[in-house]
Image: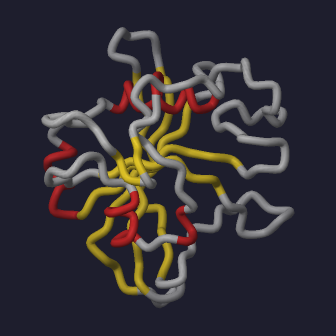
Amino acid sequence: MSISVNGHSVVPPGFRFHPTEEELLTYYLAKKVASQPIDLDVIPDVDLNKLEPWDIQERCRIGTGPQNDWYLFSHKDKKYSTGTRTNRATAAGFWKATGRDKAIYSAAGSGRIGMRKTLVFYKGRAPHGHKSDWIMHEYRLDDAVAPVTNPVFAAGDTSSYYSGISSPVRLLYHLLPVHTILLYSLRF
């Protein structure tokens, strides 16, 4: 069920969207990978390279109340057509990976289910960009967890999904301004 009117999220009054990392991976991203419907479809598809972080806020708003976290699905754009490096540039700057990827484990103890990469937005062009307060988490499923029901998977790429044979890889992103990062870290 998609809950949107004219591209804006419409949810019942009082609705709050605070999924755990496990729920993001095993429910939302896994269903997206398998091309299965999501019961309450509140995470939009967005071209991350065409929007600045401050524009994502309005595009990914859920309901009308105050919001400190924004979620989106986006494609993984390659920097070079024959390479493996990811292009994370926008018109005003770029997203830079920081630190190590963090493994996400199942609460039931069934092992690792995915990974989280932390990205920071820099205004300007690399390598001389200026660090901003925008932080984003990129989530990807482990191959063992990813559903293999979608017939358009590329070999060895079951951790992401394609909406068509020629479409780029897609991932789940969680965007938050720096002042909320401590609240987010307290969940672990």
Q: Quadrant of the C terminus?
A: top left
Quarter-wise, where is residue 34 in the image? top right
Residue 171 percent coordinates (x, y): 56, 45
- 52 or 112: nearer the viewer: 52
**Above-or-below relation of 123 to 165:** below
Residue 75 percent coordinates (x, y): 63, 53
**Above-or-below relation of 167 to 83:** above
Give the residue displayed 72% in from the left and 40% down from the top.
Answer: 162
- 147 or 117: nearer the viewer: 147
Residue 86 percent coordinates (x, y): 65, 62
> Going by the image, does 168 lie left or right of 126?
right
Residue found at the far front of this picture: 6
Residue 178 percent coordinates (x, y): 22, 64
Q: How many marks?
A: 0
Quarter-wise, where is residue 55 in the image? bottom left
- Please say which color scheme the image uses: secondary structure
Quarter-wise, where is residue 11 in the image? top left
Give the residue displayed 48% in from the left and 37% down from the top.
Answer: 115
Give the residue displayed 53% in from the left and 56% down from the top.
Answer: 46
- 77 or 66: nearer the viewer: 66
Give the residue displayed 15% in from the left and 50% down from the top.
Answer: 65
**Above-or-below relation of 114 to 144:** below
